Amino acid sequence: MACLLETPIRMSVLSEVTASSRHYVDRLFDPDPQKVLQGVIDMKNAVIGNNKQKANLIVLGAVPRLLYLLQQETSSTELKTECAVVLGSLAMGTENNVKSLLDCHIIPALLQGLLSPDLKFIEACLRCLRTIFTSPVTPEELLYTDATVIPHLMALLSRSRYTQEYICQIFSHCCKGPDHQTILFNHGAVQNIAHLLTSASYKVRMQALKCFSVLAFENPQVSMTLVNVLVDGELLPQIFVKMLQRDKPIEMQLTSAKCLTYMCRAGAIRTDDNCIVLKLDHDLKHAHELRQAAFKLYASLGANDEDIRKKIIETENMMDRIVTGLSESSVKVRLAAVRCLHSLSRSVQQLRTSFQDHAVWKPLMKVLQNAPDEILVVASSMLCNLLLEFSPSKEPILESGAVELLCGLTQSENPALRVNGIWALMNMAFQAEQKIKADILRSLSTEQLFRLLSDSDLNVLMKTLGLLRNLLSTRPHIDKIMSTHGKQIMQAVTLILEGEHNIEVKEQTLCILANIADGTTAKELIMTNDDILQKIKYYMGHSHVKLQLAAMFCISNLIWNEEEGSQERQDKLRDMGIVDILHKLSQSPDSNLCDKAKMALQQYLA
């Protein structure tokens, strides 16, 4: 049978519900309130960082019971608080978890909890609401359904630094467009949030700043109001300017720059205003450096750790920022953004989800159309990942003319671009339809394919062999390709097997022969080529097991009993001494080689 080069990674599936999970839910129904409380506390400890346990508890119906306990007047405040904490932890799992919570009408229950006089319970409800509202699956409109909610949240801002942080975060996530801006503005958002910019807590300052950036976005009314707001005797624009200083965190610098930019666009601040023009000019000069540094940092952090990649992608608006970076005027920023995406594209899960949700392939294809080599190398390397078999982006990339672009890269003088071009084509050909394979061969041309097979760069040669191996898979495809290109392919195979190449190159070449031997009509190109048959015989007796195994695959496919003409092929190979070699190999100390030889001998005995 034909073998392909690339084996895609498979995702694990949710395991079945465990008995211990059911035990946690059963304890929620105990008649003893103290035991119920302890059960909720134990459940809280069990679900922290455990998505499997969270999913199990949701399936078993924990959410409706927790919400019931949270809303019961007879429940102690401590029990209600612990229920809110557990619900918040469940919401921090997958998007499906959040959907399940929404289906159980968790938001009205939590909003009702905000009427409690107990601050810790309020904070727990707000923390859970924050997690739910920052999920992409939660409709923002749910915050505005009840007209009493926004004014009550404004009133809660003064209760603690946690209420300030969570409420500001909820507002900044749920303010999408002029209608939401107007509601928040009319309920005193500017006045209530402004003093939080001088909070002792960095998180509070940052969330307040984000609120102003979304309130001022394309909104002249808000922008004009912000200009005259005083905080501790200082105008708001001056506070934003201070937050631009280079000793401040990059996130704070960029967000405060946004606020000032939106105010300038709205005409609230003149672009030549002496109080900010020098600082803004200075910031604009360094904005590219800041973004470049940030993208480089994220690229390094996400290079080898799946959990970190997930956290980066789940950071608010992060994917949008990185994708926007692909079209920056600065080459250095574009390069850093591509490197960042390339690092994140190592994640199978993100290729299937976030990269598809943000249609990352579109701006990437634009980058590949006209960019300097340093960007092309990283962008084409990322494209290799997007063309893996399990990537949803593969089909639209194919439809956007990727074949011609990649074939063009294989002609580059830059070896790295040649490698990436042929590597991407290799991934594209994996389990592809006949039409795609034909398109690749037509666009690449037989001449270019064989130029690549004699490339001085070993990586180019290996990936080209990998492409051939993937093209020559599935019997109808093998027969079709060999019927039109068989002569040239057999010549190339002969040259490589005769040349001074390493074990890996020759192994790949023998695997290509094994795929050809799996064809219905293509195998005759081997059987009628005595030179090739002698080479297969030679490698069956080679000192390296990898080459012996690859040669064995060729023989097994040629002598398989169930296929037409097998008797004649068996006879010819017996006359060549192949059976004698099989007997020797059946005594090999290598168990794999021994088994393959015995299996081949059985074909002669059948």
Image (cartoon, grey):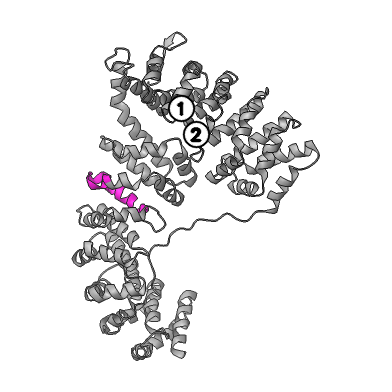
Q: Residue at x 37, y 36 (%)?
A: 321
Estimate the x, y position of residue 551 in percent, counting from the top left.
Answer: 37, 77
Residue corresponding to mark 1:
180
Vertical relation: 236 (above or below) 451: above
> Magenta segment, which residues?
366-386
Q: Residue at x 32, y 16 (%)?
A: 269
Answer left or right for 249 relative to 33.
Answer: left
Q: Which quadrant does the N terminus fall into?
A: bottom left
Q: Closer to the camera, 523 or 110?
A: 110
Vertical relation: 433 (above or below) 306: below
The answer to whether the residue labelled 1 contacts the one labelled 2, judged by CB atoms less than 8 Å apart, is: yes
Element at badge 2? helix
How many angstroms separate mark 1 from mark 2 (CA)? 9 Å
Which numbered disc covers residue 160?
none
Is most of the magenta stretch helix, strand or loop? Answer: helix
Vertical relation: 408 (above or below) 142: below
Answer left or right for 262 relative to 56.
Answer: left
Estimate the x, y position of residue 295 in percent, counting from the top left.
Answer: 37, 37
User: How many discs appear?
Assistant: 2
Q: Residue at x 26, y 82 (%)?
A: 531
Amino acid type, callout 2: Glu
Q: Closer to the camera, 280 or 415?
A: 280
> Is residue 248 something one can see in this rendering?
no
Query: Residue 377: within the magenta?
Result: yes
Answer left or right for 442 relative to 234.
Answer: left
Estimate the x, y position of residue 348 in percent, counting from the top left.
Answer: 44, 52
Residue corresponding to mark 2:
140
Vertical relation: 363 (above or below) 162: below
Q: Which image quarter: residue 275?
A: top left
Q: Closer to the camera, 494 or 387?
A: 387
